[in-house]
């Protein structure tokens, strides 16, 4: 088998792209398209890489469920001993049902409701990562009403500029909606002595996503370590430091964030203080382990542009249209004329939006109708951001494990689209009009 084309798992055999030797064309024929295909081995290897890099410190990998919350994926991740970073009650239930113990779950997000807090307290999660003062007050109230103590880490906004590819994915600057500024966070930690229903156990920071440089993490780390030290001196010892997620991957085949370089500093600084480490990687665990398969429906030319219309679009992979996400696109079967000149095409979906595209002005060997394309690095924020817009059915998901393809989510049916909807009886007047009887 040849070298990895999209990632080591996705290599060619006799010109055909496979997932660990399993024919992607075969999977598309069996399960239909669009189709998500994930590589279990790749996910396990990424988790191992984190554990290896951070082996020098007590470490919990809290996988960020938002990246890909499929139950089977969560189950396999949980089976490695990992926990979960969640942002809603729905993600909590997913993680629990997949077998991830509550004691390994941290709960972030700027808009937690009282009901979500109550459920997470009942489940016994590791900690709430609180993002505003009013949220902290509500959490205290909910915990008091239940007669329990809520474990808390404040999500600090360290005011660092993180070099993310799009400003939508930067979260560590003062003007972002995330976290609490340093000085205010310090006051809240100090207020803990008078708040018996809150237990301050940690500190959390997440500066953004798809970051490939180590320095912004180190800047954020130093900011929170100063806080940790001051708090310890003030009699508020913390148990863990959570440095968030956002570790960049190679969408264009480049190297992602150098974990070992980050780990060298983080490990040393945390060990000095006897702090546990939590990280919340999402995309760096599942991103490169997934592809989206899509068939070419039509080609056309207009206004000097060449369009390739595929059966997947923004409803299956929102990243390109939402924040300019760039994904490699390759033919699954290399044509006999492999090496034919590439032409610039817009790869667009069937959704009725001009913003519905997978790639713009992308040089590709012009595909034929019916050709199968693989969109790379689609394991993260692919299915999890998929929608039913235009009443489209969300695709199936397949996990390739030990060279066996396992269907881990069937394609939605029309009944899935209309589940929960109700057509009320027509009001009397309208019913009369409808029936042609003028006297109501
Ligand atoms: C609080 C928090 N933690 C972790 C993540 C995971 O980021 P990534 O998938 O880029 O690792 C996110 C992403 O938005 C997040 O908001």
Image (spheres, rainbow, N blue to C red):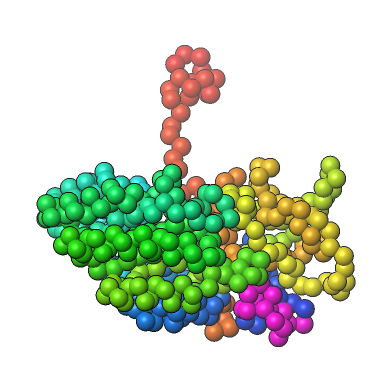
For the residue pair 184 and 424, the one nearer the viewer reads as: 184
Q: Residue at x 48, y 53 (%)?
A: 161
> Magenta region: which residues?
1-14
Closer to the camera in the image, 196 or 146: 196
Picture residue at 57% right of the left edge, 70% below the top: 256
Predominant secondary structure, magenta span: loop
Instruction: Give the quadrant of residue 292.
Output: bottom right
State which image quarter holds ligand 1.
Answer: bottom left
Residue 315 x, y percent position in the rendering: 59, 52
Position above or below: 143 against 27: above
Where, quadrant-wise, is the N terminus in this rendering? Answer: bottom right
345 with respect to 435 (left or right): right
Residue 410 magenta-drawn? Answer: no
In the shown orientation, is residue 73 left or right of residue 228? Answer: right
Q: In the picture shown, does residue 219 fall above or below 178? A: below
Residue 271 lies, in percent from the top left, at 31, 77
- The residue that appears at 38% across and 54% down in the rendered structure is 158
Q: Is residue 393 visible?
A: no
Tell me if residue 419 can be seen. Answer: yes
């Amino acid at each position: 088998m040849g070298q990895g084309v999209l990632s080591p798992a996705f290599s060619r055999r006799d010109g055909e792209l496979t997932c660990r030797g399993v024919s992607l064309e075969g999977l598309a024929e069996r399960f239909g398209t669009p189709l998500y295909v994930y590589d279990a081995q790749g996910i396990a290897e990424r988790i191992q890489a984190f554990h290896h890099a951070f082996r020098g410190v007590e470490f919990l990998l809290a996988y960020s469920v938002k990246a890909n919350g499929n139950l089977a994926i969560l189950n396999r991740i949980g089976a490695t001993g990992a926990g979960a970073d969640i942002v809603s009650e729905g993600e909590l239930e997913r993680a629990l049902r997949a077998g991830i113990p509550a004691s390994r779950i941290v709960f972030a997000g700027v808009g937690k409701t009282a009901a979500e807090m109550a459920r997470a307290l009942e489940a016994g999660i590791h900690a709430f990562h609180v993002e505003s003062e009013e949220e902290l007050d509500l959490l205290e109230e909910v915990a008091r009403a239940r007669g329990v103590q809520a474990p808390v880490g404040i999500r600090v906004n360290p005011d660092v500029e993180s070099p993310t590819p799009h400003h939508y994915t930067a979260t560590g600057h003062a003007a972002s909606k995330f976290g609490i500024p340093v000085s205010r966070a310090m006051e809240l930690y100090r207020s803990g002595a008078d708040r018996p229903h809150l237990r301050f156990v940690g500190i959390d920071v997440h500066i953004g996503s798809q970051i490939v440089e180590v320095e912004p993490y180190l800047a954020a780390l130093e900011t929170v370590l100063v806080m940790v030290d001051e708090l310890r001196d003030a009699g508020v010892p913390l148990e863990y430091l959570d440095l968030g997620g956002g570790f960049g991957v190679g969408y264009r085949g480049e190297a992602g964030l150098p974990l070992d370089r980050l780990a060298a500093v983080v490990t040393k600084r945390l060990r000095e203080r006897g702090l546990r480490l939590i990280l919340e990687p999402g995309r760096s665990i599942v991103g490169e382990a997934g592809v989206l398969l899509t068939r070419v429906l039509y080609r056309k030319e207009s206004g000097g542009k060449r369009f390739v219309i595929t059966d997947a679009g923004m409803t299956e992979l929102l990243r390109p249209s939402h924040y300019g996400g760039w994904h490699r696109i390759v033919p699954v079967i290399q044509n006999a004329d492999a090496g034919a000149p590439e032409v610039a095409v817009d790869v667009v979906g069937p959704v009725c939006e001009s913003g519905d595209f997978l790639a713009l002005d992308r040089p590709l060997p012009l595909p034929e109708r019916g050709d199968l394309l693989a969109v790379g690095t689609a394991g993260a924020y692919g299915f999890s951001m998929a929608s039913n817009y235009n009443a489209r059915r969300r695709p199936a998901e397949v996990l390739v494990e030990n060279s066996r393809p396992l269907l881990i989510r069937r394609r939605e049916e029309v009944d899935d689209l209309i589940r929960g909807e109700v057509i009320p009886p027509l009001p009397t007047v309208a019913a009369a009009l409808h029936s042609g009887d003028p006297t109501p």
